[in-house]
Amino acid sequence: MKLVAVSACTAGIAHTYMTQEAIEQECKKRGIDCKVETQGGMGINNELEQDEVDAADVVILAIAIGIEGDERFDEKRDEGKVIEVDPTQAIKDIKKLIDRAEALANE
């Protein structure tokens, strides 16, 4: 399975990067190929290219604010392959979130 994600919180500091770490660690445990873009206080890091988004089975948007480049995910939204959650929810229950992503990828 291939997963891409964007993490962005209102302050752009702690939760943005905590969410990135939680997603990456859980995916590593499960052997899931993932890349997480952060849009935080230091700008955009690890930016997702359109071909990476297109190749992904599932997109997780762990965001509490509007993000730059949101239109990159329109096709995945149309396919029903986008999960949008608050960053705090992603951190609190990362196992459940990745379970949802795996189930969606297998639909």
Image (cartoon, rainbow, N blue to C red):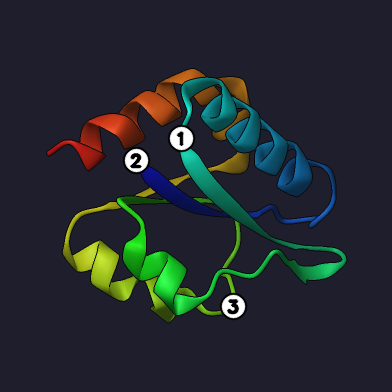
**Residue 42 spot, x, y in % from top left:** 87, 66
Residue indicated by mark 2 = 1
Q: Which amino acid is tagged 1?
A: Ile
Image quadrant containing the C terminus: top left
Per the rendering, the mark at residue 68 is 3
What distance separates the C-alpha of mark 2 from that of mark 1?
A: 6 Å
* Closer-to-camera residue (23/41): 23
Q: Which amino acid is tagged 3?
A: Glu
Dot 2 or dot 1: first in sequence order is 2
The residue tagged with tag 1: helix, strand or loop? loop
Task: Verify CB contact (< 8 Å) between mark 2 and mark 1.
Answer: yes
Residue indicated by mark 1 = 32
From the viewer's perspective, is the residue at label 3 or at label 1 nearer? 1
Side of 97 where 67 appears, left or right: right
Height in image: 49 above or below 23? Answer: below
From the viewer's perspective, is the residue at label 2 or at label 3 nearer? 2
What distance separates the C-alpha of mark 2 from that of mark 3?
A: 25 Å
The residue tagged with tag 3: helix, strand or loop? loop
Crowding near pointer 1: few (<14 within 10 Å), some, many (20+)? some
Residue 89: which quarter of the image?
top right
